[in-house]
Image (spheres, grey):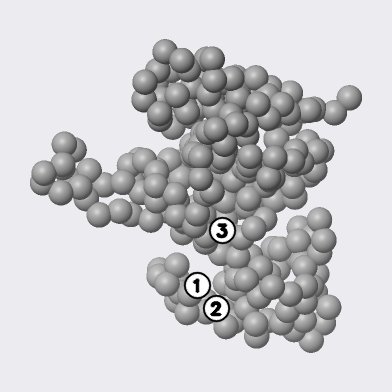
Amino acid sequence: MGICLKLELKPELAVSYKSFSQRARILTEAWIQENMYCPACPSDHLSPTRRGERVVDFVCPNCSEQYQLKSQSHPFGNRIVNSAYAPKIEAIRAGTIPNFLFLRYDPRRFIVLDLFLVPKHFITESIIEKRKPLGESARRRGWVGSNILLGNLPPDARIPIIENGREIPAAVVRDSWNRFIFMREQSLRSRGWLADVLACIRELGQEQFTLRDVYAFENRLAQLHPKNKHIRPKIRQQLQILRDHGIIEFLGKGLYRIRKS
């Protein structure tokens, strides 16, 4: 029997909270705890971490994958305000960054509208933006936050679980997860390159593309990876990795095709 997600939130759980943000957090976290399965393994639920746990909100009791929940009532844009910059970069480099769940809900009807997952192997330094330090008049003056640049990710990095109130079958979600799990085997730097080159390929908006098409993004990739001075060889290297793992196929004479999942 397949997993069936109930889209309704339970407003009665948050009646004692006055703050809108607190009520939203209580309702959406309760929904995840009661409904959400692990996309990485067959487990049909996620366990909440201890209240106040930094960074991680849920963990799979079976495979130990960790998840952080971001929820809001309006659609997610290309830039998401997030936590302190330095600890996030440290977590990426240490491999302790969690997977991210992005949930949108209707505050009037108390239902989940959208939910998508960004696996941790797509969370690289390329998509973390450093914000300006808080001013002298701020309570936490000098504090430096971060933004997650969702718009810089390839669409493959956003795994839909619920779209416009419609549940995506768990088997499809898990297939999407497994398609790019090979990125866990790559170095941190290689994961960033793979995600960025794939984003460029997807931006072309066509099933077939040429090596010359990808070379057109050379300047952008140089800005994202300023320490690397050999951009075209790196592009070819990422295309080879994507070929080896069945994401694209080589048709000959510099022509490639994106393989359907």
**Viewer-side residue, 56 vs 150:** 150
The label number, if any, that marks residue 103 in the structure image: none
Residue 141 falls in which quadrant of the image? top left
In the rendered structure, which amino acid carries the disc numbered 1? Leu
Answer left or right for 24 relative to 168: left
Identified by mark 3, the residue type is Leu
Q: Which residue is mark 3?
A: 153
Q: Secondary structure at mark 2?
A: loop
Q: Going by the image, does 172 lie left or right of 77?
A: right
Visible in this render: residue 230?
Answer: no
Per the model, the C-alpha gap separating discs 2 and 1 is: 6 Å
Residue at 66 percent of width and 75 percent of height: 204
Foreground residue among 205 and 126: 205
The residue beneath circle 2 is 217
Q: Which mark is residue 221?
A: 1
So how many labels did they put on this image? 3
Q: Is residue 218 above or below residue 184?
A: below
Mark 1 or 3: in front is 3
Which is nearer the N-term, disc 1 or disc 3?
3
Label 3 vs label 2: CA separation?
15 Å
How far across and how far down the image is residue 94, in percent? 45, 41
Residue 212, position as x, y percentages in the image: 65, 85
**Helix, strand or loop status at disc 3:** loop
1 and 3 marks in contact (CB < 8 Å): no
Q: Residues within 10 Å of mark 3 (few under 14, many from 20)?
A: many
- Amino acid at the residue labelled 2: Phe
Q: Quadrant of the N terminus?
A: top right
Contact between marks 2 and 1 (CB within 8 A): the answer is yes
* Image coords of residue 146 (percent x, y): 36, 49
